Amino acid sequence: MSLVTDSPVHSSSSGDDFAAYLDGELETGSSDSLGHEEVEANNEPEEDAEDDDDHESKRTKRLKVEKVQHVLDPQGSTSQVLMEKNIEVSVEQDICTHPGSYKNLCMVCGKELDVESGVSVGYIQQGLRLGNDEIVRIRNTDMKNLLRHKKLYLVLDLDHTLLNSTHLMDLTLEEEYLKGQTDSFQDIPKGSLFRLDFMHMMTKLRPFVRTFLKEASEMFDMYIYTMGDRPYALEMAKLLDPRGEYFHARVISRDDGTQKHQKGLDVVLGEERAVLILDDTENAWAKHRDNLILMERYHFFASSCRQFGYNCKSLSQLKSDESETEGALSSVLRALRQIHHMFFDELDGNLDNRDVRQVLKTVRKEALKGCKIVFSHVFPTRIQADSHPLWIMAEQLGATCSSEVDPSVTHVVAMDAGTEKSRWAAKEKKFLVHPRWIEATNYLWQKQPEENFPVAGGATDPQ
């Protein structure tokens, strides 16, 4: 069976050499297979060539499949063995393990497979699936290369994390002025507000996003992962990465996921212990919360505020925007630098045994280290206090939480200055802050000034 016409790598974007080579290898059979060791570019013999005859029957044929040119990483990045380097699959003698398939055809032997197996990676090539063992092998191999280059993986959400989009029909009268301020597609790298008439949409990039991507790319191999459909995801990738420097084919949409309404790292070709995630929706990552850095939502357009039930003016209606230097992306970049530095430069022991999820927890705990917090009338009485998300968040940030006041308490968190504990805080000169103080600290990765989060109402003035 010929793979020249059926192979996914045989297309207008890939050379014919691989398909012809693969056909030739399949026709010659296992008797002419390559040695277990890789053939070096200079074709120098191995030092132990004299032992080759003894092991010839046990050798494994390795096929190097060069990926399509348009996803090659010009920087020589180690991420995505499939997309940026080579696919390396093994077949012992005459038995093919079917490590990957394209439209139910094995990519190695060309056999039609009766049942779909493994994981779909259609974002790389539509119809492409990889077996579980092959994914494990790719991840292990790529992980070693990545660590040698002192890089990790970073998975980025789009909407409300890196940008905000709206349908043109949803613009309010207060936002009509935006139509005259859109940037040119002829100079995308300098723009931040784009009107996509063919999609009937307008998109605003989050302040600092271009600097963020540039600097993050030096520490991470990056993926886009969105709940939007694939055409939308690809258009947004063009706005964020017009020169194709950061993402290449690593753009995953809801069409590529394996679970409805959920995101998962099963389709990401990176070991979970080396993956960080930036997303504004915690529930989307039910199985990977330990990898997640929760982002404050970017609500530039009024429709975004309405979508989440906020009865307030959007940034566009206020003719304002986030700060470049003190906004969400700038703050999280500082945290990523700290995590990256600790992972590679501060921890003892073997690099191969390190887990970025543990480093993430350690860095996060520095934010409210030394704070002891008591909550006052913040949680519904029917809910156990220590199971409330705000209590858990405070502990993750390094604070100690208590149900009762004592001299060691540093902060009382309340929404009403008239409660008994609020009055105690005023009397004892403790900090009295609104719950948003904890949330802001969580998003910005450092303790926020207490005076910016006063508690209104009650018989006493806010601290």
Image (cartoon, grey):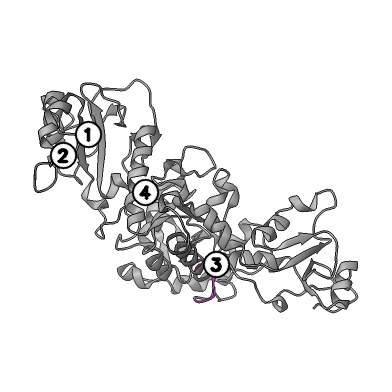
Q: Earlier in the sequence, mark 4 or mark 3?
A: 4
Give the mark nearer the N terminus: 2 vs 3: 2
Which residue is depicted at the point 43% across and 64% down?
Answer: 345
Query: Of marks 1 and 2, which one's residue comes earlier in the chain?
Result: 1
The amino acid pointed to by label 4 is Met
Q: Amino acid at mark 1?
A: Ser
Marks 1/3: CA distance? 45 Å
* Residue 341 within the segment the image draws in magenta: no
Q: Nearer the viewer, mark 4 or mark 2?
A: 4
Q: Is residue 93 left or right of residue 300?
A: left
**Res. 178 mark:** none
Circle 3 sits in a helix, a strand or a loop, which is it? loop
Residue at which label 3 appears: 300
| Disc on res. 143 | 4
How dense is the environment of label 2, judged by Cα within 10 Å: few (below 14), some, or many (20 and up)? many
Closer to the eye: label 1 or 3: 1
Q: Which residues are magenta?
A: 325-329
Question: Closer to the observer: label 2 or label 3?
Answer: 2
Name the residue tied to disc 1.
7
Q: Secondary structure at mark 2?
A: helix
